Amino acid sequence: MIGSLKGIVSEVLPGFMLLDVDGVGYRVHASVPTLASCVSGEERRLYIHDHVREDSRDLYGFPTAADLAMFERLISISGIGPKAALTLLSVGSVEIIRRAIMAGDIALLTSVPGVGTKTAQKIVLEMKGQLVDEPGESMEDRDVVEALMSLGYASAQARAALKQVDVTVTDTSERIRLALKNLSKR
């Protein structure tokens, strides 16, 4: 399974980009804001969700681990496929989506083509309990916790492992790596 790709953006097309990694062009689906930020010829690193079905294999790329974690949470809900989840992430940042779910903002969720009232209510119902804020927790810490939770760790486990990470480490990817290291010691 592919976890991330780092390469040169060779083409940006509607709905996906071609990412050249050592001469191999990967077709990576991405949200509208992610595609809009890509420029042909620049080097990009994307977190990848490798979606395998009986009749196809698609790659979905995200600029941050938090975006990937939210995408994977969304597609775990019955009735939400990868395309609908990607469209949801095109509405706004992960933080905007998270706040909409926490507030039960059905109107924002139903503004996405293909997401009706029942599906939006289902998203709120299934995800609201998973997105609980800790008092004083920064957005970066929330990103790390959400990434760890997408890997199957409980919220309490993820937060405990994150507390053991040195506060001077500010890179989100490095904080995730160190938290995983702490979790593997248990």
Image (spheres, rainbow, N blue to C red):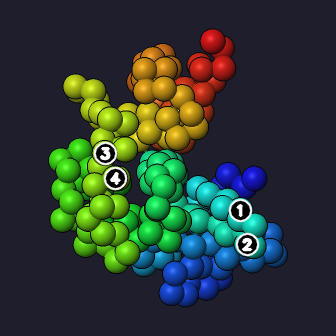
Relative vertical location of residue 155 with respect to residue 100 in this rendering, above or below: above
For the residue labelled by badge 2, is the local secondary structure a helix, a strand or a loop?
A: loop
Amino acid type, label 1: Val
Would residue 7 be found to the left or right of residue 114 on screen?
right
Amino acid type, label 2: Ser
Query: Residue 56: which disc?
Result: 2
Q: Is the C-beta separation of discs 3 and 4 under 8 Å? A: yes
Residue 27 place in picture, x, y as percent: 67, 76
- Where does the C terminus fall, quadrant-wise? top right
Q: Which residue is mark 3?
A: 125
Query: Residue 52: which disc?
Result: 1
Residue 88 place in picture, x, y as percent: 37, 66
Amino acid type, label 4: Lys
Amino acid type, label 3: Leu
Q: Is the C-beta separation of discs 1 and 2 under 8 Å? A: yes
**Of label 4 and label 1, which has the lower sequence position?**
1
Relative vertical location of residue 23 with respect to residue 172 in this rendering, above or below: below
Relative vertical location of residue 74 with respect to residue 159 in this rendering, above or below: below
Residue 136 place in picture, x, y as percent: 23, 26
Q: Which residue is mark 4?
A: 122
As drawn, the residue found furthest toward the top would be 186
**Of label 2 and label 4, which has the lower sequence position?**
2
Residue 96 place in picture, x, y as percent: 26, 56
Q: Nearer the viewer, mark 2 or mark 4?
A: 4
For the residue labelled by badge 4, is the local secondary structure a helix, a strand or a loop?
A: helix
Name the residue at 46% across, 52% down: 77
**Of label 1 and label 3, which has the lower sequence position?**
1
Q: Nearer the viewer, residue 78 or 175?
A: 78
